[in-house]
Amino acid sequence: MKILIIEDELQLQGAIQEFLVGEQFLVEVASTFDSGLEKALTYSYDCILLDIMLPGGSGLDILKVMRQEGVKSPVLILSAKDSVDDKVVGLERGADDYLAKLFILRNCWHG
């Protein structure tokens, strides 16, 4: 399974990537609006993990363009914005699910 992580917080991006690679997924990353949009439109992914607030633009705009261009990859929004309104907007734009950034990656927890 090939996954694209579009996330500008490099520490979080790295933790998610490390976790998914450890689970035997093929992972690519992007840290900006432009690089995320380019990868999402150019390559095929089984899943895209998408942050909303990115340098250069909004992840919601990436999602909008993807859907307009016929990209059907499932999208999971990962965002610090966790109000019901934010979730509704993300899902209305074409996301498959919305996860607030208050999650723990199983093998990254050192408690």
Image: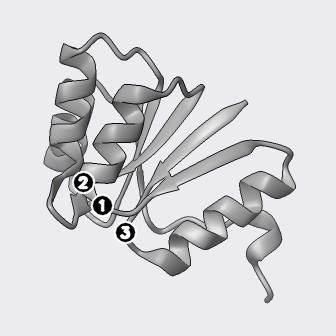
Q: Residue at x 73, y 65 (%)?
A: 18
Residue 21: tell me if it is visible.
Answer: yes
Q: Which residue is mark 3?
A: 8
Say if mark 1 contacts mark 3, CB within 8 Å.
yes
- Element assignment for label 3: loop
The amino acid type found where label 3 is placed reads Asp
Callout 1 crowding tier (Cα within 10 Å): few <14, some 14–19, many ≥20: many
CA gap between label 1 and label 2 equals: 4 Å
Residue 93: tell me if it is visible.
Answer: no
Callout 3 crowding tier (Cα within 10 Å): few <14, some 14–19, many ≥20: some
Left or right: residue 94 compared with residue 4: left
The amino acid type found where label 1 is placed reads Thr
Residue 42 location in percent, x, y? 40, 28
Instruction: Give me the disc on residue 33.
Output: 2
The color scheme shown is one colour
Instruction: Give me the disc on residue 32.
Output: 1
Q: Pick whichever, 81 or 34, lies toward us.
A: 34
Instruction: Give me the disc on residue 104.
Output: none
Q: Residue at x 76, y 79 (%)?
A: 109
